[in-house]
Image (tube, helix red, strand yellow):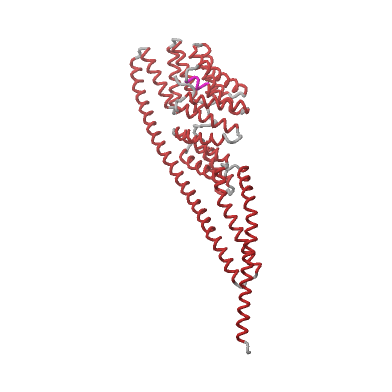
Amino acid sequence: MRSVRICVILLVFICSVNPGHSQKVKVDSLAKRLAVEQKDTARVRLMWTMARDMTRYDPDSAMKLAQQSLYLAQHIGDKEGESRSLGILANTFVKIGNYARALELNIRKLKLEEKREKPENLASVLMNIGIVYALEEDYRIALQYYSKADSVIEKFNVDRFRYNISLNIGDTYNRLNISDSAYVFFNKSFNIAKAKDDRESMGISMTGLGHCYLKLGSYEQSLMNYKGSLDYLQESNNDEVLCESTLGLANLFRKLNKPDSSERYATISMATAKKGGFLPAELEAAEFLTEHYKSTRKIDSAFAYVSYVQDLNDSVNSKSKIRETQIISSNEQFRQSEMEEERRHAQKKRFEQLQLLLIGIFIPAFFLLTLLLSRARTHTRLVRLLGVLSLLFLFEYLTLLLHPTVAKLTNHTPLLEILIFVALAAILIPLHHRLEHWLIHKLSHFHLHHQHSETKTVLAVEEKKSPA
């Protein structure tokens, strides 16, 4: 028997509801603002906000927009924008069903958040990694990440996620059939929801408690929680968890040997799932009814449901194939966007290298010009000025060349960078002054000597021309 579905539990992180017209209107409004926005940080925020809202109805476009947001955020050093973009990209891949890529992006976000002091962001990404592992049915590892998230939430009092983490841990223990631990966390989540008068969340938690009591053999408590959840789930239109709760009741009544009630609630579960388009829930309810009719010897009904289950299985398999195609397509789209960004980055790097090359050519050319001017009839002050500029260009060029290496060595740590450049300055500044003094002296001496030689030559020529 399945337990509460994680994609329904964590609406904060992975929302699968269909948007209304107002949602698309909101995205259109954001797109108009983005078209005129000039500030990069604001553009990043607008893009990831649009991508987040578009994930619900157009995941392909959302993925492309989130990637653009990510690259711009990385380019301008906007860590919050980078983190948000990575999270939205991951959620988009979850929506598509590409869990491997979602996990990769969430881990990138985790590495980023581990270096920041944003407990809420850290808790959310740890929880989202747990969700991905749970969706892949690797519940032990999911529980590890949920526990880490729970520690962050408790340590930093992140009240916003207390309900979600308690519910998810309870759900995972329930899937592992560790019912006593599942009960503790489902009950904790119920008390949190009750304190906030969040009736939908109360209904979800009570469904989980119904599962626990059923496994523990406390049928009366299970019945009370299952039935108590129905009103809350119906008034909040949470049909997916309602399917869980009604099928839980069907299982309970089968154990209580009440076949009519069991059939009734299984039928309600299947009808609700069919209406909401919840194919896995519809299949499970149909399989339950098939076994039910076999056990009650209603052969015609059992035969009809066998055929119905086969059709549903075909639909599930068809959806699985479509999902596989979407995963391949999303991976290729993501790869193409990465290649485009790499080309843009390589082009920018080539342009920077070309600039450095031109500067490297310009400095000796400028120095050569200074030497040539020192031989011409030029004012001494101009020669000195050009000599000083030549040295300034040389030392600034050295700093420009060294900066990327220093940044890489220090892992972009400002304190270490400034210490290294102070040490370099302690060497280069005295050297600069000495070279400046020597060069100006030599150029000035050469310039004056050249002028003196020219003067003597002119005087000698004039003496030869004058009559004896």
Badge count: 0
State whether residue 215 appears in this view. yes
In the rendered structure, which segment of residues is drawn in magenta?
170-175
Q: Nearer the viewer, residue 102 or 350?
A: 350
Does the magenta run of residues contain 174? Answer: yes
Is 303 displayed left or right of 447 in the figure?
left
- Residue at the image point whose x is 50% and y is 37% from the top: 89
Q: Nearer the viewer, residue 63 or 303?
A: 63
Is 450 displayed left or right of 211 in the figure?
right
- Residue 354, given in percent of the width and then of the height, sits at 50, 56
Q: Nearer the viewer, residue 383 or 111?
A: 383
Question: Looking at the image, which residue sits at the far front?
Answer: 468
- Residue at the image point whose x is 52% and y is 42% from the top: 70
> On the image, which quarter does residue 201 sit in?
top right
Report the predominant secondary structure element of the magenta stretch. helix
Quadrant containing the C terminus in the rendered view: bottom right
Does the magenta run of residues contain 261? Answer: no
State whether residue 45 appears in this view. no
- Residue at the image point whose x is 62% and y is 22% from the top: 195
Q: Is residue 232 above or below residue 116?
A: above
> On the image, which quarter does residue 162 sit in?
top right
Question: Looking at the image, which residue sits at the far bottom?
Answer: 468
- Residue 241, given in percent of the width and then of the height, sits at 49, 23
- Residue 27, given in percent of the width and then of the height, sits at 53, 41
- Residue 356, given in percent of the width and then of the height, sits at 53, 55
Quadrant containing the N terminus in the rendered view: top left
